[in-house]
Amino acid sequence: MRKFIYRAHLWLGLIVAIPVLAWASSGLLYAWPSAVEGGQVETIDAARVRVLPSDALARASEFAGRKLPTTALTLLVREGRPVYQAVGGLGADSLLIDAENGSVVNTPPPGPLTRYFRQAHFYFFAGSWQVPLLLTISMLACLSAGSGLYLNLTMWFGRLSGRH
């Protein structure tokens, strides 16, 4: 039985280590300045903001040709210009509205480091399976920790009783 638990502990540790390594490396990547788009904070010059948030939302809907289900509107600096980023749904699609002149463009696709960060850190690749995947990985991590505790306790109690 102990040999089975040892092997299970080893395999569980390897299985759980892969997503934990991806999560940790993507977190380190986010801490690296300018590696991930939006990771650098710039001061907004309020004098340059000429478009009101309500006008930005109206222009975004006009650009799309329908009323957009916007869940977030963020004012940020992108390439030195103040822009609103209108995000809809779960953040998959967004539009950029220039806060100076009101022009609207689709948000350009992210670079490879930003894509890796989003996929590895938030498990976006899993889609609707994101929560079940995270629960499964958590359960496997608990089993790995529990089997490790069992193996350590049996080893130490075996030494104390003189059986090891």
Image (cartoon, rainbow, N blue to C red):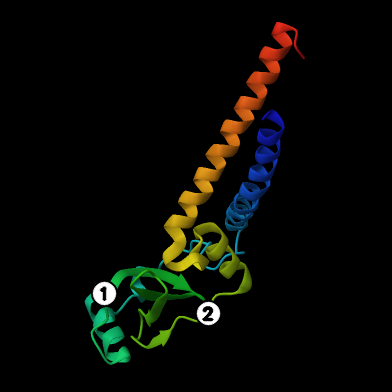
What's the mark number on residue 76?
Answer: none
Is residue 123 visible in the rendered image? The answer is yes
Residue at 60%, 57% (x, y): give it: 26
Say whether disc 2 or disc 1 marks the residue closer to the N-terminus.
1
Estimate the x, y position of residue 20 in percent, counting from the top left: 60, 49
Residue at far top of view: 161
Instruction: Sort mark 1 into few (<14), some (14-19) or many (20+) by Cα contacts within 10 Å.
Output: some
From this view, report whether residue 160 is shown above or below residue 59: above
Quadrant of the rendering where the C terminus is positioned: top right
Question: Nearest the camera: 161 or 24?
Answer: 161
Which residue type does callout 2 highlight?
Answer: Pro
- Judging by the rendered image, the residue that carries numbered circle 1 is 53
Label 2 or label 1, whichever lies nearer to me, is 2
Q: Callout 1, which amino acid? A: Pro
Residue 1 vertical position relative to residue 42 in the rendered view, above or below: above
Residue at position x 28%, y 80% in the image: 56
- Residue wearing tag 2: 109
Q: Position of residue 102 (x, y in %)?
A: 33, 85
Is residue 8 or residue 58 the one in the foreground?
A: 8
Q: Does residue 67 lie above or below 18 as drawn?
A: below
